Amino acid sequence: MADQTAQSEASAPEGEGVRQLRCEVYTPTGTVFTGNVREVIAPGTMGELGILPLHAPLMTPMRIGELRLMTDEHTEILYAVGGGFLEVRDDRVTVLAPTCEPASDIDSERAESAKTTAERFLTEGESEDGDFDRAQKDLDRALNRISVAKRK
């Protein structure tokens, strides 16, 4: 997974340009993104969260879904995230996710194969470990990866 860094204006006090958020996205394997963004749209457990500069402090769990980082008026960076947590504090957004894959890195064939495998297990009960909850999460992750890949 390649690190990506937004090349945007630094945070600016009000009246001196566009105010930005400092955003950092981490997984257990390392840093996925660090840079300045104008908006973060994240998959909260109760729906999408839109985070703009001057947002109130917040800590919340995330569900499997699409993480969007708006770096400027025309640039959106898309990620498929596998849940995790999001914290907002002092114009800084920190995302901790078990998985976070850039849309450009998603292998659509592999995601389709994972979807087929999970669906087969859920409908026919065929699995090595018999874990239905895990199969449902695998299906949710595969469907999310397919959705995000289509938007790239």
Image (spheres, rainbow, N blue to C red):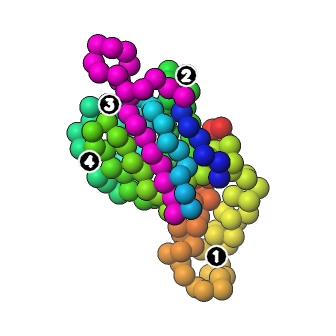
Q: Mark 3 or mark 2, which is nearer the start of the sequence?
A: 3
Which secondary structure, mark 1? helix
Label located before the other in sequence (1 or 3): 3
Determine whether 139 is above or below 72 in the image: below
Residue visible at 56% across and 37% down?
5
x and y, in percent, of residue 65 in the image: 50, 51
Instruction: Looking at this view, name the residue that lies furthest to the right.
Output: 109
Taking 152 as reference, is 83 left or right?
left
Look at 29% across and 13% down and name the residue there: 15
How far apart marks 4 and 1 lie (CA) works out to 38 Å
Task: Quarter of the image for the C terminus: give it.
Answer: top right
Magenta-span inclusion, residue 20: yes
79 displayed left or right of 2: left
Q: So how many labels did they put on this image?
A: 4
Question: Is mark 4 in CB contact (under 8 Å) with mark 3?
Answer: no
Residue 45 position, x and y percent, is: 36, 55
Decide which of tag 4 and tag 3 comes sooner along the chain: 3
User: Which of the two discs, 4 and 1, labels the residue nearer the N terminus?
Assistant: 4
Q: Amino acid at mark 1?
A: Phe
Q: Amino acid at mark 3?
A: Pro
Q: Quadrant of residue 128?
A: bottom right
